[in-house]
Amino acid sequence: MLYDWHMNSISRFNSLDEVGGQNQASRRGHPISRQLGTRSLVLVGLMGAGKSTVGRRLAQTLKLPFRDADHEIEAAAGMTIPEIFAVHGEDHFRDGERRVIARLLQEGPMVLATGGGAFMNEETRQRVSECAISIWLKADLDVLMRRVRKRSTRPLLQNADPEGTMRRLMELRYPVYATADLTIDSHEAPHDRVVADVVKALADWFDRDKQGGHEG
Ligand SMILES: Nc1ncnc2c1ncn2[C@@H]1O[C@H](COP(=O)(O)OP(=O)(O)O)[C@@H](O)[C@H]1O
Ligand SMILES: O=C(O)C1=C[C@@H](OP(=O)(O)O)[C@@H](O)[C@H](O)C1
Ligand SMILES: [Mg+2]
């Protein structure tokens, strides 16, 4: 192993830094954050769904720390995601992704944006179900394609038919994303509109929770 996915020093330093943030959140934070306890909010969904950008704004709204698993992997590896794919291959990336998410889930509460493939890993799904509330950000194909065209940082889409790839990923992944606790339409509206929809869905979730709706 060239680097330690669990304990890179930058992430440890950040997490210590953010313990103060957590304490603050629990003292005078958003009602949703207070009900989370140590559980995190984990955003899942396809590339372009808005996990990273909506996630960051959601964390600001809830006064929670924000982490992006892709950024943590890049920091641990000292390489960008395209470089990791090119040099070590996708399997190596997936291995790092699983380890990094396992570590982050122990540092909750936080808003955690995952990369689009992370939730396909059964071990990760199990950990998420134990330590977090999962939220599927769902968007139509044409919306996703418009959004991902803005950047060429996604190795899976660097081919002759990115739309075909996205369709295949939809078929493969949607049944799995559908097992997330909540599904939110990440439609064409300002990011903050989607944030508001997530907050509303979480408030309803906790109301149902109080009535014993999520047992078992
Ligand atoms: N609700 C939205 N409104 C406008 N642009 C959005 C929205 N959600 C995402 N985007 C844009 O789409 C692109 C991809 O979003 P990102 O958060 O990186 O997606 P993901 O992390 O799910 O791949 C970014 O340029 C982002 O600003
Ligand atoms: O869907 C995927 O398998 C991937 C999604 C990417 O993250 P975003 O979903 O944030 O684009 C990134 O993890 C990597 O390029 C692989
Ligand atoms: Mg992202």
Image (cartoon, grey):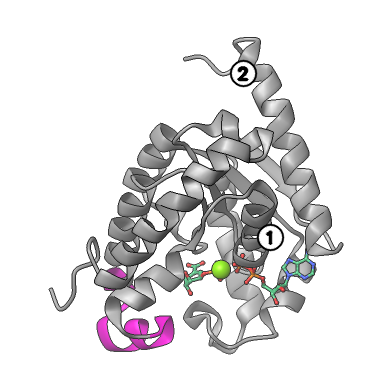
Residue located 34% across and 88% down the image: 86
Between 75 and 184, the one lying in front of the other is 75
Q: Secondary structure at mark 2?
A: helix
Front-most of residues 17 and 132: 17
Q: Which sits in the foreground, 34 or 77?
A: 34
Q: Which residues are magenta?
A: 80-92
Please tell me which of labels 2 and 1 falls first in the chain. Answer: 1
Q: Which mark is residue 57?
A: 1
The quarter of the rendering in which ligand 1 is drawn is bottom right
Q: Position of residue 63 (x, y in %)?
A: 62, 50
For residue 140, above or below residue 4 = above
x 40%, y 60%: residue: 17
Kind of residue at disc 1: Arg
The CA span between labels 2 and 1 is 25 Å
Q: Amino acid at mark 2?
A: Asp
Q: Mark 2 and 1 residues: CB-CB less than 8 Å, in contact?
A: no
Residue 166 horizontal/vertical position (percent) = 62, 69
The x and y percentages for residue 79 are: 34, 85
